[in-house]
Image (cartoon, grey):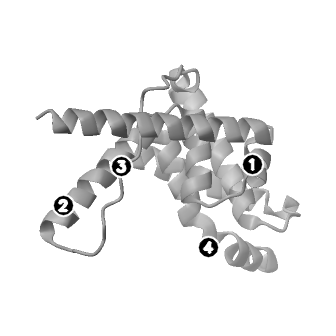
Amino acid sequence: MPGQVASFEQLVLPHMRAGYNLARWLLRNDHDAEDVMQEAMVRAFRFFDGFRGDNPRAWLLTVVRNSAYTFLQQNRARELGTEFDEEVHGEPASADRTEETPEVLLLRSAQQRSLNEAVEALPVEFREVFVLREMEGLSYKEIADLARIPIGTVMSRLSRARRQLQAAVGRRERGGSAS
């Protein structure tokens, strides 16, 4: 048991931040993400003796994902069946980083908030693949294995998420210039 604890600490604990990040984006609530992360870590430790893979990060993210979806099914089932609108979201244009004036920093902060809101508004299945790919850097194959879906579905969901994010940014920019 002491060897198992040491192995768990060495292999899994370094990936807790990535796990929390995934839970936070899937659940869109800090408190719920903390609860799900706690449950996921308990599950991960309980079943660590069955871990045979070479990628503890992907393994932990799978446990976190499953815990988050269990939470959603039990507490917010309506989010799992959400229809999507192709025109919903987009990502803000990146600001040049040559000038770090307060105005530039404020604009960048507003753009980041806008992007975060757009990502949070994505349907959960699109938000999941977007976060795993763009924020956690997982490959399409890793995402497909983690979510138990075909790679083509990963690519399709990621493409739709990106289109929704681009559309949202376009709408926000048009709305901002009309003021």
Give the Cα separation between the discs numbered 2 and 1: 37 Å
Give the Cα separation between the discs numbered 2 and 4: 32 Å
Give the Cα separation between the discs numbered 3 and 2: 14 Å
* Residue 63 coordinates in the image, percent (x, y): 70, 51
First in sequence, mark 1 or 3: give its number: 3
Q: Quadrant of the C terminus?
A: top left
Seen in the picture, residue 55 relative to 5 is either above or below; the reply is above
Q: Nearer the viewer, residue 31 or 5?
A: 31
Q: Nearer the viewer, residue 71 or 135?
A: 135
According to the picture, the residue beneath numbered tag 3 turns out to be 92
Callout 2 secondary element: helix
First in sequence, mark 2 or 1: give its number: 2
Q: Residue at x 73, y 80 (%)?
A: 6
Q: Residue at x 72, y 74 (%)?
A: 11
Callout 1 secondary element: helix
Give the Cα separation between the discs numbered 4 and 3: 31 Å
Q: Residue at x 50, y 27 (%)?
A: 76
Mark 1 touching mark 3, by CB under 8 A? Answer: no
Seen in the picture, residue 105 relative to 10 is either above or below; the reply is above
Q: What type is the residue that disc 4 sits on?
A: Pro
Q: Quadrant of residue 139?
A: bottom right
Q: Nearer the viewer, residue 19 or 171?
A: 171
Determine crowd level at label 2: few under 14, some 14-19, many 20+ residues with C-alpha closer than 10 A: few
Give the Cα separation between the discs numbered 1 and 4: 18 Å
Q: What type is the residue that disc 2 sits on?
A: Leu
According to the picture, the residue beneath numbered tag 1 turns out to be 146
* Residue 161 coordinates in the image, percent (x, y): 54, 37
Determine crowd level at label 1: few under 14, some 14-19, many 20+ residues with C-alpha closer than 10 A: some
Q: Residue at x 61, y 41 (%)?
A: 158
According to the picture, the residue beneath numbered tag 4 turns out to be 14
The mark found on residue 106 in the picture is 2
